[in-house]
């Protein structure tokens, strides 16, 4: 079966799943709108995630944090200084690329020998330079120094900031989690592959706080549980893989990360794209917001300082440790983070459900028919009322039945 991404994109527009944003003005790059069927599918995925993570688990609560937050948050978390992609340009055709698309070890490349994939010219690529992915804006009526703020590039930091608030107002004890679904924004250099890599996207994240000695156990628990969630909702196991990161791939603070990946049709055979990451973040995040930006030196996380040994970026100074009133122990919890993309999940379920059948027409000739074989719990519509005749009161019966069913489930 020729399951190409072009056919899926066409189906999404034709049937009201996903539209290009600002379409009547020529479109707005890497931003998408969800149509009537698309938003039902996306809501089903999000609601099933929310039920699985915050309702069926005994010790997880929800949160909805702000998209705009204090700029110092992003300094302490490392996003201002380190949330970058390496960027190169072709001086001949002006095409722009991430440097790591050419090689993971891009700093060792001789860029005068590199050929532009777009125009084929050699020797016209610029040297790599770092490009910060955060969208900058200004707070207040005047754009001036000191008024800069950022649209959040991830939902996680809003959870860490509210760690103490949740502890003080909810009946939770470590181990416990905080879940959030919300929009994030990244100024991607090379957004591509439909909704797989876009500038505005929705995340579904849990930050699970646990005792340091139990963190490896909880990492394994969430890794296995999240893998099973996708299988339970119908993704083909043969097109799904669970991949542990190699040591060289890990962030400097990470104790381990596993990606749940899917074989999207826009990728080459044998290649997979990330659906969800399950990260063992240690105590990096809470300590960063207490102390300031942390870096790894000689295997230890230490406060980053300037030449005068003063902190480069200070934290809040607030105590974000946890006191266990049973064991009488105080510690900074470790964090396990299952982080999923709602938009990527929609795309994966659509790709997996897409099938082409050949059925005979009225004359017996084969006719191509596109079928979406979605799991019933994900299906945007649960029922269709189709009167076979337009007489004998059948349309009225159908209309009445439709009105009654629609109160219980989406139907047509």
Image (spheres, grey):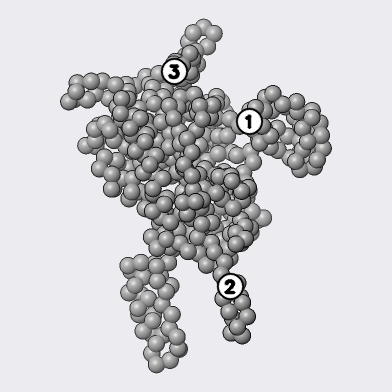
Q: Position of residue 212 (x, y in %)?
A: 32, 25
Residue 51 visible here:
yes
Depth check: 3 or 395 in front? 3
Q: Secondary structure at mark 3?
A: strand
> Alpha-carbon distance for marks 1 and 2?
44 Å
> Alpha-carbon distance for marks 1 and 3?
25 Å
- The disc, 2 or 3, on the residue closer to the chain's N-terminal end is 3
Depth check: 282 or 39 in front? 282
Closer to viewer: mark 1 or mark 2: 2
Q: Quadrant of the C terminus?
A: bottom left
When the figure is inspected, residue 200 is found, relative to residue 5, above or below; the finding is above
> Alpha-carbon distance for marks 2 and 3?
60 Å
Numbered mark located on residue 407 in the image: none
Q: What is the quadrant of residue 302 in the picture?
A: top left
Which residue is at 45% across, 62% downward?
374
Residue pointed to by mark 2: 358
Q: Position of residue 32 (x, y in %)?
A: 56, 52
- Judge from the rendering whether residue 396 lies leftward or rightward of residue 309; answer left or right: left
Are discs 2 and 3 less than 8 Å apart at CB?
no
When the figure is inspected, residue 38 is found, relative to residue 308, above or below; the finding is below
When the figure is inspected, residue 52 is found, relative to residue 399, above or below; the finding is above
Residue pointed to by mark 1: 104
Which residue is at 56% across, 70% downward?
357
Q: Quadrant of the N terminus?
A: bottom right
- The disc, 1 or 2, on the residue closer to the chain's N-terminal end is 1
Sort mark 3 into few (<14), some (14-19) or many (20+) by Cα contacts within 10 Å: some
When the figure is inspected, residue 403 is found, relative to residue 141, above or below; the finding is below
- The disc, 1 or 3, on the residue closer to the chain's N-terminal end is 1
Q: Secondary structure at mark 2?
A: strand
Q: Position of residue 44 (x, y in %)?
A: 40, 56
Residue pointed to by mark 3: 301
- Residue placed furthest toward the bottom: 392
């Amino acid at each position: 079966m020729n399951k190409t991404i072009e056919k899926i994109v066409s189906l999404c527009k034709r049937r009201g799943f996903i539209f290009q944003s600002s379409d009547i003005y020529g479109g707005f790059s890497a931003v998408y709108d969800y149509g009537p069927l698309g938003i039902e599918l996306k809501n089903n995925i999000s609601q099933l995630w929310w039920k699985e993570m915050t309702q069926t688990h005994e010790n997880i609560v929800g949160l909805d944090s702000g998209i705009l937050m204090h700029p110092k948050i992003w300094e302490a978390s490392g996003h201002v200084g380190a949330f970058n992609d390496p960027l190169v340009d072709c001086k001949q055709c002006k095409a722009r690329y991430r440097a790591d698309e050419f090689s993971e070890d891009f700093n060792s490349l001789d860029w005068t020998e590199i050929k532009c994939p777009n125009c084929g010219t050699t020797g016209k690529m610029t040297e790599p330079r770092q490009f910060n992915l955060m969208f900058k804006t200004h707070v207040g009526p005047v754009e001036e120094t000191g008024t800069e703020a950022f649209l959040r590039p991830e939902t996680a930091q809003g959870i860490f900031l509210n760690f103490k608030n949740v502890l003080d107002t909810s009946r939770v004890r470590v181990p416990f989690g905080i879940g959030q679904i919300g929009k994030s924004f990244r100024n991607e250099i090379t957004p591509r592959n439909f909704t797989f890599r876009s500038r505005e996207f929705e995340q579904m994240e849990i930050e699970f706080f646990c005792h340091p000695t139990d963190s490896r156990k909880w990492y394994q628990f969430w890794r296995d549980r999240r893998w099973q969630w996708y299988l339970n909702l119908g993704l083909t196991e043969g097109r799904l893989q669970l991949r542990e990161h190699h040591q060289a791939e890990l962030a400097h603070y990470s104790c381990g990360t596993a990606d749940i990946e899917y074989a999207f049709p826009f990728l080459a055979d044998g290649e997979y794209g990330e659906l969800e990451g399950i990260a063992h973040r240690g105590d990096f995040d809470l300590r960063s917001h207490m102390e300031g930006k942390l870096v790894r030196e000689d295997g230890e996380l230490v406060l980053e300082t300037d030449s005068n040994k003063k902190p480069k970026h200070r934290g809040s100074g607030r105590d974000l440790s946890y006191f266990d009133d049973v064991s009488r122990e105080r510690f900074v919890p470790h964090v396990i983070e299952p982080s999923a993309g709602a938009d990527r999940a929609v795309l994966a379920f659509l790709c997996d459900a897409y099938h082409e059948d050949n059925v005979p027409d009225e004359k017996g000739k084969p006719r191509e028919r596109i079928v979406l074989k979605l799991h019933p719990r994900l299906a945007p519509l649960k029922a269709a009322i189709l009167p076979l005749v337009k007489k004998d009161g059948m349309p009225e019966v159908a209309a009445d039945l439709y009105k009654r069913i629609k109160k219980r489930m989406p139907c047509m």
